[in-house]
Amino acid sequence: MGMLVGMNTPTRMAGYALGLAAVFAAALGAGKVVGGPDPVPPTAAHDGGGHGESQGGGHDSGAPEVPGGLQVAQDGYRLTPVDGGLPVGQAAPFRFRIVGPDGAAVMDYTPTHDKDLHLIAVRRDLTGFQHVHPTMAADGTWSVPLAADAPGQYRIFTDFRPAAREEALTLGVDVPARGDYRPAPCPHRRAR
């Protein structure tokens, strides 16, 4: 922890983005090895508010907590893209909403790391990522110029804290960048 004190905010945020990407990659690999989870009975998925969105929200009888960014929804909050994907090469607005438990766009946020919302776009083969700060319109739609470096599948992570919550949320959703997808091999690690 002492190492983080001397780091500047962009360095800490880049480390955070890489950490999210590593968690996502590990979960994806583990999922491919062991298969998907057993179906959750409808009564076990409820968070007490009747929304059925919560997994790992604290009202659980021993199930492991799902890491942030692997779910599109948690505790009644949902990441909802407005646009269908990312353009390749030239930036265009990527628009989305955070919808709250009441079904309306969340309008009030408590800043974390000096911003209301952080967005990280990571290519599935981990060959690139972007950490940006969208702006919110009066209707609750967030927008930020994004461009994919190459076609493929990207994971969009949003990190935010609604004013109505004590804790921040990290939600994620997959979006395509259309074109001829050619995955890049992961670099080999040298033996220590």
Image (cartoon, rainbow, N blue to C red):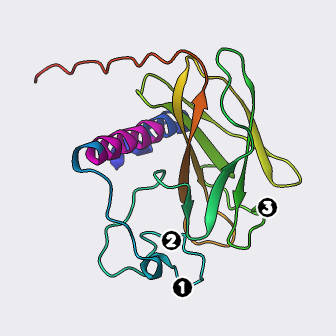
**43 above or below 93?**
below
| Mark 1, residue position | 48
- The type of residue carrying mark 2 is Ser
Give the quadrant of residue 20.
Answer: top left
At 43% across and 37% down in the image, what residue appears? 15
Range drawn in magenta: 16-31
Q: Earlier in the sequence, mark 1 or mark 2?
A: 1
SS majority, magenta: helix
At 74% across and 35% down in the image, what residue appears? 144
At 56% across and 38% down in the image, what residue appears? 120
Q: Judge by depth and name the residue closer to the eye, 3 or 63.
A: 63
At 53% across and 33% down in the image, what residue appears? 154
Residue 54's disc is 2
**Answer yes or no: do the residues labelled 1 and 2 have beta carbons within 8 Å?**
yes
1 relative to 109 in the view: left or right: left
Residue 107's disc is 3
Q: Residues within 10 Å of mark 1 (few under 14, many from 20)?
A: few
39 relative to 96 in the view: left or right: left
Give the quadrant of residue 28.
Answer: top left
Report the residue that reaches farthest toward the left. 192
- The type of residue carrying mark 1 is Gly
